Image (cartoon, helix red, strand yellow):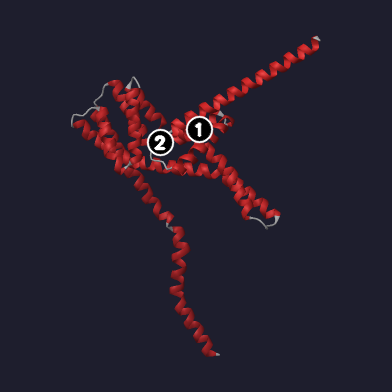
Amino acid sequence: MTLDLVLWLAMIACVTMTMVLIAREVQSRALNMRVTSAVLGAPGQSGRLHTLTEWLARAGQRYRRYYHPENLEHLRMMVQTSGFNPHRMVPVVIGGKMLSMALFPAVAMALTIGVPWSSRLILLLMAIVAGIMVPRLLLQWVRHRFNSAIQRGTADAIDLLVVCSEAGMGLESGIERVAQEMARTNPPLSQVLHGLLNDLQVLPNRRDAFLNLANRSTCEGLRRFGTMINQSLQYGTPLGTALRAIADELRRDRITRLEERAHKLGAKLIIPMVLFMLPAMFIVLAGSPALHLMQSLHSLK
């Protein structure tokens, strides 16, 4: 009788623990869905795009636990330096990776029906590799375009900020004005400046905002801008002098990069010359004498 009572109590305890774990999992998933819906509820998205983004975010939230913290932090930095909100886009990127890893092999299997198994296996392995690499390559391409746009417009933005500073505007108001002016010509840089304004409004110390800008930026111009403004605020040097020095350095760096590209142009032109121009020149120069020689030899016979 005592053994039966112990077994019943153990079974009740197991059932209770199972129900508690199920309730916690359901609550956790409901909370994740609410947070994802709140974060992804960006206006201006179509219904299908919003549904796809929400589905990818749910899949990413489910599978992000299998990521190593270092890899997850690296992915977050890549997403942030690509111009996206990391809290919104990291689960979407992870969900996109999972979808591509399943979609590419399925498409490869469907397109290789009737192909021998050896070739089919090779194509399947190539599709798996493509499914793993394509989302990362797309993210790197977006990141490169974003950083290139920022690098092109940093010097112009600093020049505008110098003008605003000389006109008597404060630092925050000058950055806000420059962000508004750069919204049409360079939206990525305007987005970065708006993020800097948000940090200036939220953080208790303005130096922390510029230090964060210097630490999380991959553009050399913005890194110099954040570091020099941080030092200017720390040591009390004139802001206009610091901004003018940054603008001059960025202009010189741009001219130096253009000169380096101009010097490399001669070496880069060798390959198209050898492949396309020299054969045509040989045909034009040697074609007529060769035809005359063949005609003369034919007449001797």
Relative to 108, does residue 30 appear above or below in the rendering?
above
Tell me where residue 226 appears, x and y as whole percent. 34, 29
Q: Quadrant of residue 207?
A: top left
- What SS does tag 2 mark? loop
- What SS does tag 1 mark? helix
Residue 80 lies left or right of residue 114; in this view the side is left
In front here: 200 or 47? 47
Relative to 267, does residue 27 appear above or below in the rendering?
above
Label 1 crowd bin: few (<14), some (14–19), many (20+), radius 10 Å: few
Q: Amino acid at mark 2?
A: Ala
Is the C terminus in the top left, top right, bottom left or bottom right quadrant? Answer: bottom right
* Residue with the mark numbered 1: 74
Residue at left 57%, top 29%? 65
Relative to 192, does residue 114 appear above or below in the rendering?
below
* Residue with the mark numbered 2: 42
Query: Does residue 247 appear anywhere in the picture?
Result: no
Residue at left 37%, top 47%? 260
Q: Amino acid at mark 1?
A: His
Label disc, if present, on residue 234 of the rendered structure: none
In front here: 1 or 99? 1
Residue at left 35%, top 26%? 199
Is the N terminus in the top left, top right, bottom left or bottom right quadrant? Answer: top right
Tell me where residue 46 appears, x and y as whole percent. 42, 43
Label 2 crowd bin: few (<14), some (14–19), many (20+), radius 10 Å: few
- The mark that comes first in sequence, 2 or 1, is 2
- Per the model, the C-alpha gap separating discs 2 and 1 is 25 Å
Q: Quadrant of residue 281?
A: bottom left
Residue 106 lies left or right of residue 176; in this view the side is right
